[in-house]
Image (cartoon, rainbow, N blue to C red):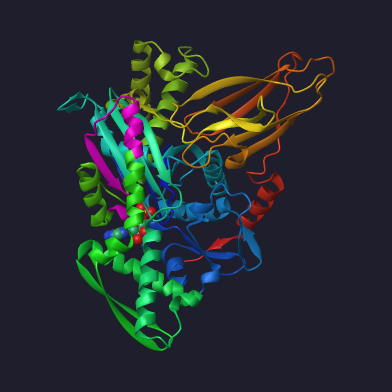
Amino acid sequence: MAVHGIDLGTTNSAIARIAPDGSPAVLAGMSGEPTTASVVLFASRDEYVVGEGARREARLDPEHVCAMVKRRMGDAAWRFVAHGRSWSAPAVSSLILSSLVADARFADGTEPTSAVITVPAYFGDEERRATVQAGVYAGLDVVDVLSEPIAAALSYGFGRLDGSVATTKGTGETVLVYDLGGGTFDVTVIELADRRISVLAVEGDHQLGGADWDERLALHLSRRFCEAEPDAEDPLDDSAGAQVLVLAAERAKHELSEAERTDVVIAHDGVRVTVPLTRAELTELTAPLLRRTVDLTRSCLAEAARRGVDRVDRVLLVGGSSRMPSVAAALRTELGLEALLHDPDLAVARGAALYGEKKELERMVAADLRTRGRLRDGDPVEDAPTADLDDACRRVADAFAVPLAQVRRAVEIRVDTVVSRGFGVLAVSDAGRLEPTWLVHRNDRLPVRTSRSFGTVRADQAVVALTVVEQQGQAESQRAQDVKILIQGEITGIPPGHDEGSEIRVTFEMGFDGILHVTAHHVEAAMPLELTATTGATLSQAEVARERDQLGRARRRG
Ligand code: AMP
């Protein structure tokens, strides 16, 4: 009955499940490593390799190696082409998921069938849908997509949610999660109080992570190499040479997390150059990158303060790149925050497994209550009378041999989260321009249901075109050219006889998963007008069928 927790990371991924003792355990595959490199090598038309083997091959066969596919999630036009086949971002991701599923099967002999998959908090609607699609391609029932910082906070604070956490300032604890991974940065302020875990504010940058540190360092190394050997070719001018240099840069970066200095040996174009490097140099070369994370952290704190929370009790550092000593140092000197490096590689997968178990136990308790007529369809379990809820928890605990306290905790703990970006529609303004009108705003609490009315622009209007848009960048722009078009649809077949300005009611609904559902309605026509969304954002049905067929033929090697 287990729901597995999967951290589908930019550079590394991991799978976890709840062990019989109730604690989340990460499952290692045959390699014995708890994490798998999120890298796919397309070895031939139908054969692929996932993980460290694929990462190593990146040097020798860069054209057939796909890394950092997470940065492409939600980009429906992107394809990775290898050996005459093309793969969308969800399809490539599904190969990574399938590899994790195989690891889990190897680790404990059970076949994962359902999972909670984590995503960065600022992932928008398309990226979340693409993640669900990846899970479906891998044959998983995706129970939910969960924000990575919530998963990290759950893994840190789940046990602490049992009672009220005592802090110097009373009950409740405010946690800032600073997550700097390989390709993404995410900062979140979360409150743990009264068996509730609430996201107060999120900030992040999709295109910022450890790989950017590697790139800056590789650039520096190539400069030093060219200074020492002016007649040799620049390693960055050659794709294999560049790969080797970036890997050397990453290794040096790791060493400088432990040591103050290191030497990097660059062998290229028949010559060898040794470049000495210090931690201070690395910090200086990459200072603008770190500054950006500090700035985003500052604005996340400001948003939390606007919501009445102006103190942070705990700073959790997650993501591999937060191991760089410069991170904790900058948070201390710039923001006065003392940070704790918390299980940086596995906290997210563990938290996802805890959440998966919570969802599963909650589902069973709800099913028990419903079959006994103590809960109406669609109502949340907390709406049931306390005595009934207690009885249902006991029956589920007995039936599945789970400690009663675990079932109670799963049912009682609430997870509140917020919208990652603004969503709206393009409508004609009073000035006659097409402008975005925002219905849902970043940091609104989920779930959200909101409606707004618009008027038709002329009498007897037979067709209404609707464009649903998503915020890009930090702020909600008032200019149509600044937004991302999510869904373009038309309401057609409106009968004549309606005046100009007839009401078109648009409703946005978003559940905890952050996936948007839009409906539109011509009120006067009193007919349920369908929004026929012709979204260019997600894959077409034909494309999904083609990829399914392709995935069905693909065999994993190694
Ligand atoms: P993640 O996406 O959380 O798996 O993080 C991967 C990123 O963390 C990569 O960019 C790694 O280079 C980086 N990383 C891992 N270990 C260290 C370390 N000891 N020092 C600096 N960066 C690290």
Name the one closer to the observer, 164 or 99.
Answer: 164
Residue 178 position within the rendered picture, expressed as x and y whole percent measured from the top left: 31, 44
Quarter of the picture for ligand 1? Answer: bottom left
User: Could you tell whether 210 is left or right of 525 in the image?
Assistant: left
Above/below status of 322 relative to 307: below
Q: Quadrant of residue 21?
A: top left
The magenta segment is 299-322
Magenta stretch encompasses residue 317: yes
Residue 150 in sight: yes
Quarter occupied by the N terminus = top left
For the point 36% across and 71% down, the residue is 220
At x 46%, y 47%, the residue is: 111
**Residue that lies at the very extreme toward the right in this rendered image:** 496
Asked if 327 appears above or below 19 in the picture, the reply is: below
Horizontal side, residue 357 vs residue 536: left or right: left
Residue 289 quadrant: bottom left
Where residue 359 appears, as percent x and y from the top left, is 42, 31
Residue 358 image offset from top left, x and y in percent: 38, 31
Res 18 visible? no
Considering depth in this image, is 7 or 419 the residue closer to the camera? 419
Query: Where does residue 462 sit, x and y in percent of width and height?
Result: 82, 24
Q: Is residue 230 magenta?
A: no
Q: Residue at x 80, y 15 (%)?
A: 498
Residue projecting furthest to the left? 168
**Identity of the residue drawn at 47% across and 14% down:** 375
Residue 451 in the image: above or below residue 153: above
